[in-house]
Image (cartoon, grey):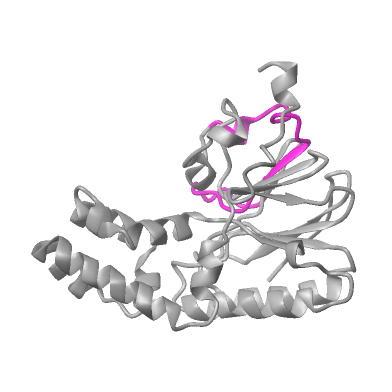
Amino acid sequence: MTIEAERTPPPASEPNVFATLRGGGRIWAIGAIRGEVARLHALHIRLAAECKPGDQLVYLGDYLGHGTLVRETVDEILLFRRAYIARPGVGLDDVVYLRGTQEEMWQKLLQLQFAPNPGDVLRWMLDHGIGPTIAAYGGTLDEAFVCVRDGTLSLTRWTGLLRQTMRTYDGHTALISVLKHAAFTDDSTLLFTHAGLDPSRPPSAQGDSFWWGSSAFSTMSEPYYGFKLVVRGADHRSGGVMLGTHIATLDSGSGYGGPLTAACFGSDGNILQLIEA
């Protein structure tokens, strides 16, 4: 990796892919939630008390799936955003949402009729926690597999009904449509991702690595493209919270029986506070 590449941040010309955060202030990052609305509500209470004017919030993905209260979790996220941006000195861009594995799978599920082997894809998604989200928006697995058997038109109707049901819940479709692949500070101090990244590739070429991570992420021993710290919200290997020199993981097992974790990062990229619920 060249020195020039190390200093190259994600392209600011891709606002639909990357979110840019203000450097020089405090940033709170919230780990993978996975449908655990009670933990999220408790964490929000803590955040409401701890956040100061000018603080920014980054949700690191996996709002859906696993836990059974998926819709309620999305409602809680939207309600807290509404309350937070109503505070004096807080801007609309001070709350950022990243796309997680669950949200990526949900988007793919809504296009299941285009998959070469929809039955295999559906079973794989179920093994990775998509079931509660299907149920939350009015679908059943029995109906899904019947539609898989009946063909493309049946699947198209089924996914269309899921979309239609989701639209009946205020703000849910809008939230999914604004999710970012990653977020970074404009001073290139911090980079936030969902499940990590491939250290050998630039931010603009990560592709699915943002959602599925890379086995090389946990062994990173030098700054990635000039960023002091890369923070991820999910660890598919369930290694727990990890705070290293150049990487940090905030997945404490929410959705799998563990708590939900958030961390506050200072202007220099160091962790100032760690809270959980």
**Rendered position, 217 above or below 73:** above
Is 227 a magenta residue? yes
Left or right: 94 as drawn, with respect to 135 = right
Camera-side residue: 196 or 25? 25
Can residue 14 be seen?
yes
Prevailing secondary structure class for the magenta stretch in the rendered image: loop
Camera-side residue: 205 or 67? 205
Residue 235 at what x, y percent from top left? Answer: 55, 49
Q: Quadrant of residue 129?
A: bottom left
Considering the image in quadrants, where does the C terminus appear?
A: bottom right
Q: Quadrant of residue 254?
A: bottom right
Q: Quadrant of residue 122?
A: bottom left
Left or right: 109 as drawn, with respect to 260 = left
**Rendered position, 83 above or below 193:** below
| Residue visible at 16% across and 61% down in the picture | 152
| Residue visible at 49% across and 64% down in the picture | 256
Left or right: 49 as drawn, with respect to 100 = right
Residue 3 at what x, y percent from top left? Answer: 75, 18
Residue 61 at what x, y percent from top left? Answer: 57, 59
| Residue visible at 49% across and 39% down in the picture | 207
| Residue visible at 72% across and 24% down in the picture | 6
Q: Which residues are magenta?
A: 216-241
Left or right: 245 as drawn, with respect to 41 = right
Can residue 145 be seen?
no
Which residue sits furthest top?
Answer: 2
**Rendered position, 139 above or below 224:** below
**Rendered position, 214 above or below 275:** above
Is 217 a magenta residue? yes
